[in-house]
Amino acid sequence: MSQAEPAATGADTPRRNLLAQLEIDTRLLGMIGAFIVVCLVFNVLTDGRFLTPRNIFNLTIQTVSVAIMATGMVFVIVTRHIDLSVGALLATCSAFMAMTQTVYLPQFFGIEIGNPLIPWITIAAGIGVGVLIGCFHGWLVGYLGIPAFIVTLGGLLVWRNVAWFLTNGQTIGPLDAGFLKLGGINGTMGETWSWVFGLVAAAFSLWALFSARRNKISHDFPVKPMWAEVALGAIVSGAILGFVAILNNYEKPARVLAREFEARGLTMPEGYTEAYGIPFSVLLLIAVAVVMTVVATRTRLGRYIFAAGGNPEATELSGVNIKNLTIKVFAIMGALCAISAVVASARLTFHTNDIGTLDELRVIAAAVIGGTALAGGIGTIYGAILGALIMQSLQSGMAMVGVDAPFQNIVVGTVLVVAVLIDIIYRKRIGD
Amino acid sequence: MVDRSGTPLVELRDISISFGGIKAVDSVSVDLYPGEVVGLLGHNGAGKSTLIKCLSGAYQKDSGEVLINGKPVEINNPRDARDHNIETIYQTLALADNLDAASNLFLGREIVTPLGFVNDAKMEAETRKIMGRLNPNFRKFEAPVSALSGGQRQSVAISRAVYFNARILIMDEPTAALGVQETKMVADLIEELRKDGIGIFLIDHDIHSVMQLCDRASVMKNGQLVGTVNVDEVTEDDLLSMIILGKAPEKAA
């Protein structure tokens, strides 16, 4: 504990309760609570089919595409902008990547279909397109001063139809086999590597907690009691390993395994089982989440994004180039749309003309349910991902229960409005 | 008494700016010596804030010269101003409300680790140090500055100027939003900074506080300089008539 400044924490922030001791964000806790309630209710309504490894596996891979874009939408909304074009941008990136791997590379560059380089070149090209379009949006907003709402509303129409133009409206497929590995069920880590990943992730979380504590002590800042630190570490590593355990419990159906063995010219041994483990697309989401969180909290770029959302004039007077910042924010959004496009088209195994339709609304809703304030300056990456997960759970839960399609959308729309209302009330309570 | 025999710290020569055909500042010249506090007085819209924003880099002058230590310099943006150790404390308290005190203090000049990540712990430690000197009652290091009182917010803004070794400090109505106690704190601080040889431009409405804090006062009206007087040699009434009638007293320096 701090010896040098005993008064610094004492007087006006007495450590009242358990939550304060653990230093856990109560908003995060609320969202996790809401998510758990949603899961339990659907689990009861579906006679236990909702919380099976299989359904949880499906839920995670269905969430990835929207969740990746939602992390970028947090930055956009935090800087007081909006991006209505993400679904259309996803379609353009997807169309471009589909054409790259099936037409451009084989026909114009002589790279045969099936060449192991194809997925990498395709993904790089797709991200390049996403970044370029994002920069263009950011330039229109930042330098020319057109409101982001208008730029991206126009973009919604433009990019949706650029995608159409690129593919002549056709469905493009089948996509490259390597590319498809990022779609979800077609590419998973398998049991062993999933455990390895889980252990590494848990160890890393514990190390991060420990080094944050050490850093605080070295500056004589107050730290939470050791038991709280240990409890938090146990919860975090337990959650990571529990998640891995669940995904490792979803076993590949026997016929899938039999087919795999046949493809390798072998016969399946009697009683052989194998689990899917963590899908590569989920791994990708985790990587995106970690990188975006680091950018948001640990880099100057992130600091300026939040400062610009809180007070653009002050940030500009502090010597930050806001126009340039706007370009960067939209460029990040564009890159994430491209990454989502990889996941979305690989999950479908082909590119369709209507891919990503209405995704802009899902993405914005995920960010907002996750606590991103439209007034700017406030938002978290983990919140947006949780928001995406909650929305997807509602949607697929209702589908499993057999709620009619119109009612599904009515419920999701209502939840969005109620979530924001609860957030407003919460903020008023804590005087934020 | 301020020694005005050497080179002025800052000289603004014949500065003019217009906005849409209206001359907001019309060839105004003022100067500032080390350890001096120069008050800028005038009605709302007299052009004092506009003039000073040419020095802080928020606006670009149309014509005229800015000299620092006798050398002409170009100030095109707030970063240039900072490079010349010019710090500004704005009337509107230019703070990002959603960030904590340390993030605001270091905004645009974050301390980073060798890997290029922001070093929040170090910045908070530095903030605690400087606050210990400027405002020892300051406690809310973790909270966003929206949770702070006017005086606490002002001390964040001032600490920013002090921390980065300002040589020239511009204060645009620093006490406008403050209570009596907090105004006193700012006055003490100005006195302390002056002793360190910092030159201060103080823009204020309140003649009384200008009389108290400043060595000289420059009065503006309708974008033009009415005159610059030694505060010791004039009465409040003299200053008032300069502000209202735009008439310089005969004995003015």
Image: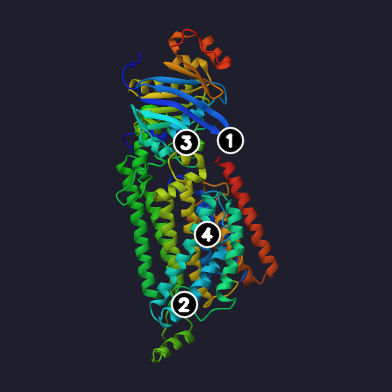
Q: Nearer the viewer, mark 3 or mark 4?
A: 3
Asked if residue A100 is positioned above or below residue B63 in the image, the reply reads below
Left or right placement of residue B134 versus residue B226 in this view: left
Q: Which residue type does callout 1 highlight? A: Gly
| In this view, A79 is above or below B49 | below
| Local SS, label 2 | helix
- Rounded to the nearest angstrom, the CA distance separating label 3 from label 4 is 39 Å
Residue designated by label 1? B20
Residue type at the position of mark 3: Gln
| Numbered circle sitting on residue A104 | 2
Q: In this rendering, which labeled residue sits more in front, label 4 or label 1?
A: 1
Marks 3 and 1, how far apart in space? 14 Å
Q: Chain of mark 1?
A: B
- Residue located beneath label 3 in the image: B60
- Crowd around label 3: few <14 · some 14–19 · many ≥20 (10 Å): some
Q: Which of the chains bears the disc numbered 2?
A: A
Q: Where's the C terminus of chain A, which quadrant?
A: top right
N-terminal-most mark, 4 or 2: 4
Mark 4 or 2: in front is: 2
